[in-house]
Image (cartoon, helix red, strand yellow):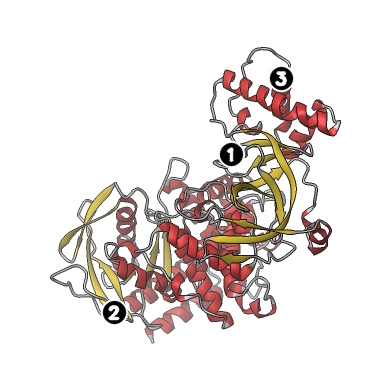
């Protein structure tokens, strides 16, 4: 009853009394602290447990952590307890970057020393110092609450992580400071965000229309910020710091992305003692950006898409093409192509929570039992099983396009899911692959046609700042690729070179073209920026085909060789390079980017394949 009375007074007394805005903010803060304290007191404190740190979990159980308050410099003291997971359980879930696990620090866990990574140690220290986090507050931390030395337990608990994060009362994303994003910098962002939120609440109290958080609807918030910081300074600094924040490693971690997607409400970012809602920071990004820069930061767009991915799940019944169970898995893989994980197997397992959320929303078929997380399997076995499932069920070859492949003892067509090519999620193929998996998953049979044959090629080259190396590589490209291509096509070398730079479409391409022309015209190396080599495709294998076309391997390790075939297959969005293995079998070498694409993406339809007399190719 006391909480209700204080809440009503905090909302209406400042308004009725004509108090200034800061009295209203003070009353709101008091109310929030009272609510937090009340909820914390309702929970039963966790008693310390003796004996082994980890005891076997029952089917519905999870482990939760409590942290004893300690002064600065004292070791962190924590306790674990097993509790049944339910919708009534109140706890906070921690999301963080594991970091270098060779850098360990000891905490006290159930009165025993327990090593944790430096990032986690800092996160626990920061959380324990928060005023609203009490000794009876429950915290879930993956690396502590799941026995990382027990693969069987991990295989059972990892599939539950999505549910654990979805049922959490709050998710805290702990972000480590850097030289470009200090705790003082984040305090500034937090202050900007808090001013915006308070202005919005004041508008609601005065019965103003609820803002939609585009620039035009934030007049009051922007006016407060202009008065406090100066008209332009807060925008420029805020925009720069937000860019730095969303370029830090926490955004790229696969588990953090799942946790952001699964949260009921936007998670809270914690840096030191300062915390801010991610949604509020995204609103602030809108306010500090103009029309040209608003969509420039890829990480921000990816975070928004992660949330929308599940928000739109109920619509999946009307969009069978993309949102079947295997289609959802493929979309999650492609949308998170740049994500990273400490364990290579988590590159897939870290996405399964999003897929299971789709299954629950749509009543779709569950994933096959053999695809359940199993940390006793080898990486190659896991990737092979998922490749077979995704290819067979989606008939989509986009997963074959990778930047690198570091797998052994599996067929050449099994992709390395750690290195999927980014930005393919919005470019679906125009046809289904009509593929078949043969010989107990060892062979992939595709339908397509041969576009041309490689007649000359250059292998992948080392990146080097040495001008002599750059000069020699340019001469090789000029003599072995561009000059013969000009002879075959009847186009001058200068024209082909111009098309080359136009094809790259880089905003500094004129600069690189000038350097290229200068080096080509001289008989000795000139001083130049070593990074020009990247723009001269010296880092990737390039090839000349019999039809005069020029192509480059999209894989760093995919060397194109003489007599390799460049083919276009159903279900693909770009050509693939294959190499004969004898007896009518081929090995997949790489995907290929052509200087003259020959076919636009929208033209790669059934009609095109019918005109070119498709045949079957078996990849091993």
Find numbered disc 2 in the image and state the secondary structure of the residue it sits on. strand
Quadrant position of the C terminus in the picture: bottom right
First-in-chain label (1 vs 2): 2
Q: CA distance from mark 1 to mark 3?
A: 25 Å
Left or right, 188 with respect to 294, comes to: left
Q: CA distance from mark 2 to mark 3?
A: 71 Å
Q: Can you tell which quarter of the image residue 519 is in?
A: top right
Q: Measuring 73% from the left and 64% from the top, which residue is drawn there?
A: 431
| Residue position for label 1 | 559
Left or right, 553 with respect to 107, comes to: right
Left or right, 130 with respect to 408, comes to: left
User: Is residue 600 among the parts visible in the rendering?
Assistant: yes
Above or below: residue 428 compared with residue 458: below
Residue 606 at x, y = what percent?
A: 79, 64
Mark 2 burial class by Cα count in 10 Å: few <14, some 14-19, many 20+: some
The reply to whether dot 1 and dot 2 touch (C-beta < 8 Å) is no
Q: For this rendering, which residue is in front, 129 or 174? A: 174
Find numbered disc 3 in the image and state the secondary structure of the residue it sits on. helix
Q: CA distance from mark 1 to mark 2?
A: 54 Å
Quadrant position of the N terminus in the picture: bottom left
* Number of the front mark, 1 or 2: 1
* Number of the front mark, 1 or 3: 1
First-in-chain label (2 vs 3): 2
Q: Residue furthest top?
A: 523
| Residue position for label 2 | 83
| Residue position for label 3 | 520
């Amino acid at each position: 009853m006391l909480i209700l009375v204080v809440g009503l007074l905090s909302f209406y007394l400042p308004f009725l009394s004509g108090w200034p805005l800061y009295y209203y903010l003070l009353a709101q803060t008091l109310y929030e602290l009272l609510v937090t304290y009340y909820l914390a007191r309702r929970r039963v404190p966790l008693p310390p447990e003796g004996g082994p740190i980890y005891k076997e979990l029952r089917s519905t159980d999870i482990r939760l952590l409590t942290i004893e308050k300690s002064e600065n410099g004292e070791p962190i003291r924590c306790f674990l307890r097993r509790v049944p997971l339910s919708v009534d359980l109140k706890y906070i879930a921690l999301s963080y970057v594991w970091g270098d696990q060779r850098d360990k620090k000891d905490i006290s866990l159930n009165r025993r020393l327990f090593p944790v990574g430096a990032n986690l140690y800092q996160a626990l220290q920061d959380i324990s110092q928060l005023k609203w986090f009490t000794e009876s507050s429950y915290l879930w931390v993956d690396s502590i609450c799941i026995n990382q030395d027990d693969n069987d337990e991990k295989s059972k608990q990892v599939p539950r992580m999505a549910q654990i994060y979805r049922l959490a009362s709050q998710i805290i994303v702990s972000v480590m400071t850097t030289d470009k994003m200090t705790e003082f910098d984040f305090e500034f962002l937090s202050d900007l965000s808090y001013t915006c939120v308070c202005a919005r609440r004041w508008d609601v109290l005065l019965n103003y229309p609820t803002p939609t958080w585009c620039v035009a609807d934030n007049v009051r918030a922007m006016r407060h910020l202009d008065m406090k910081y100066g008209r332009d300074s807060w925008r420029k600094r805020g925009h720069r710091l937000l860019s730095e924040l969303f370029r830090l490693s926490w955004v790229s971690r696969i588990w953090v992305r799942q946790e952001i997607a699964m949260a009921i409400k936007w998670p809270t970012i914690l840096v030191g003692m300062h915390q801010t809602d991610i949604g509020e920071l995204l609103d602030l990004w809108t306010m500090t950006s103009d029309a040209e820069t608003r969509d420039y930061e890829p990480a921000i767009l990816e975070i928004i898409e992660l949330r929308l991915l599940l928000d739109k799940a109920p619509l999946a019944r009307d969009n069978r093409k993309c949102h079947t169970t295997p289609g959802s898995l493929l979309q999650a893989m492609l949308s998170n192509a740049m994500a990273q994980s400490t364990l290579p197997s988590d590159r897939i397992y870290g996405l399964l929570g999003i897929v299971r959320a789709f299954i629950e929303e749509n009543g779709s078929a569950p994933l096959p039992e053999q695809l359940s997380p199993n940390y006793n399997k080898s990486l190659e076995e896991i990737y092979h099983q998922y490749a077979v499932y995704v290819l067979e069920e989606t008939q989509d070859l986009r997963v074959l396009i990778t930047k690198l492949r570091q797998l052994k003892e599996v067929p050449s067509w099994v992709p390395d899911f750690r290195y999927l090519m980014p930005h393919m999620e919005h470019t679906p193929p125009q046809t289904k692959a009509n593929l078949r998996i043969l010989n107990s998953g060892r062979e992939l049979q595709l339908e397509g046609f041969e576009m041309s044959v490689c007649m000359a090629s250059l292998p992948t080259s080392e990146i080097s700042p040495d001008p002599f190396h750059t000069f020699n590589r340019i001469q090789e490209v000029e003599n072995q690729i561009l000059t013969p291509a000009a002879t075959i096509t009847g186009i001058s070398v200068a024209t082909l070179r111009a098309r080359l730079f136009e094809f790259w479409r880089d905003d500094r391409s004129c600069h690189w073209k000038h350097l290229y022309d200068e080096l080509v015209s001289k008989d000795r190396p000139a001083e130049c920026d070593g990074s020009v080599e990247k723009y001269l495709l010296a880092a990737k294998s390039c090839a000349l085909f019999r039809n005069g076309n020029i192509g480059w391997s999209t894989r760093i390790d995919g060397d194109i060789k003489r007599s390799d075939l460049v083919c276009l297959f159903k279900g693909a969005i770009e050509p693939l390079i294959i190499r004969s293995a004898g007896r009518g079998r081929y090995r997949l070498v790489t995907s290929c980017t052509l200087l003259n694409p020959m076919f636009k993406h929208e033209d790669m339809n059934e009609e095109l394949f019918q005109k070119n007399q498709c045949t079957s190719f078996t990849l091993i």
